[in-house]
Image: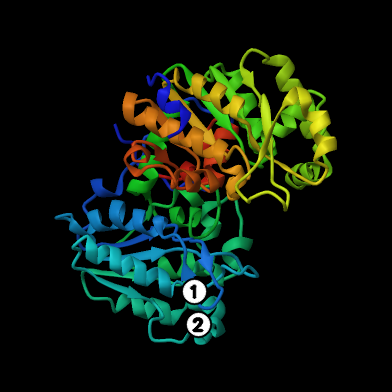
Amino acid sequence: MPFWHTSASMACWKHRLANRIPDPERPRSKMPNLRPLDSLDLSGKTLVLRVDFNCPINRNESVSLLDTRRIDDHARKTIAPLLRMPLAPRVVILLAHQGRKGHDDFVNLRLHHHRLAQVLSDENVSARVEYIWKDLQDSEIVALGAAAVSSDGVLRRIRSLPDNSVLLLENVRFDDVEESFSSERLEDYRKTPLVSMLGQLDNLVVGLDGFSVAHRAQPSVVGLAALGPLYAGTVVLEEVRALSKALVNPESPMLLVVGGAKIDDSLLSMERFLANGKATEVLTGGIVGLVFLAAQGNQFNEPTMRNILRATADYQRSVERARDILQRHPAKLRIPRDVAFGPTQAIAKDDRDTCQIEGLEAANRANPTREVGDIGVRTVGDYINRISMARTIVMNGTMGHYELPCFEAGTHELMAYTAFLAHDTGAHVLIGGGDTGAALGRVQARYARDVHVSSSGKAFLQVLSTGDINSLPAVRVLERC
């Protein structure tokens, strides 16, 4: 039983197709009020919906999807409810990507279609769920290249769909244009192959449900707004509401918990939250916490420094920025009081040694080959006491190298207590995607369900670092109420 169990628990404006993607001149304090897809009469329409089906891939023996939460969320929260509407669309065309060319996770979407069909069947949706290249071998799809995404053959297949159909198109990144094309003019996107093809469809409605791709000004995302008003799916709406509650007028006390290894963006988000006074305190861990310890003059052994340098584009500049934040906000910033060294070969894999910061120099000499990979028990206790008094908690990044058993304790204890607090007191908890969201998956489900886990890592962090959800290109082109 974690020791914290003994602690006290506490007039819709009309869309106009602009010639330029709107670009806010300054950060806005108001979140956008978006027009939801399910508010429309979609009967007889062809709905083109951008989702994010990007999943971790296992390629050891045969390709498999390791985590299908994104597919499941889109299917259950957005696609199934839309198909059940009395004014449901005639057909739904899904755009998605998987991985990136040259990476091991760059594959076609055949497995994603299987999972989608399974979830929609479980949701008692009667629609036909098709995959664009179901009759081709994987090697034949690869040979098609860009034509697998947009071509006369794809257009004919869409036009031949019977009513009440869902069609998953091919991985949009099979076409290099998806990642290479960029423009400030929406009209320019009409000339890209995918948008040009979709523009030939009749009775078209376009929607965005992939908040996790909202930071990308790509044809399958922003380019859809060149075809008409871009409406928001349920996943996007949930993200915007959760961010609004946490960032615009958060209930106080408000804590920002920052860990992980994305130093530059993390420092930006901390500076903004501290400067605007919305954060009561900022708690640090992970590589971010180590950078702040270095800013205080602490030194680390070689393996720990190697990890820090790998995470920082400019180590000295990051340390100087951390030092400046410490000097300007000494009463609001919390950095680790103790850290954990990993095991040696002679120690069981789940063992570790904790060292108070005052004794770090001696510990470095005694442990020249053992990396610092977690916060220590004193820091965990201190952070939990502070979290227990908060009404709004935003967490992004883990407290250490939590994937290793010897370094999972700090992250797990804070995640478990924060989820318990949300369940027990109704505190608003918003957790970033990526590793942070994956870490919550180890927490007891009945607590974790009271926490909002972002579907995105990079888009979430961009909003934190800018303080403005309108900094996301796709959000700026969504239809507003």
Residue under numbered circle 1: 108
Left or right of 357, for residue 147: left
Residue at 68% across / 49% down in the picture?
347
Residue at 50% across / 45% down in the picture?
439
Location of residue 264 (image quadrant) = top right
Could you say whether the residue bearing mark 2 is in a helix, strand or loop? Answer: helix
Residue type indicated by callout 1: Asn
Sort mark 2 into few (<14), some (14-19) or many (20+) by Cα contacts within 10 Å. some
Nearer-N-terminus badge (1/2):
1
Left or right of 21, for residue 427: left
Image coordinates of residue 135 in percent, x first then y, are: 38, 86
Residue type indicated by callout 2: Ile
Sort mark 1 into few (<14), some (14-19) or many (20+) by Cα contacts within 10 Å. many
Query: Who is closer to the viewer here, 371 or 211?
Result: 371
Residue under numbered circle 2: 141
Q: Point out the image quarter for the C terminus.
A: top left
Could you say whether the residue bearing mark 1 is in a helix, strand or loop? Answer: loop
Q: Which residue sits furthest front?
A: 346
Location of residue 111 (image quadrant) = bottom left
Image label count: 2
CB-based contact (under 8 Å), mark 1 and mark 2: yes
Query: Who is closer to the viewer here, 384 or 429?
Result: 384
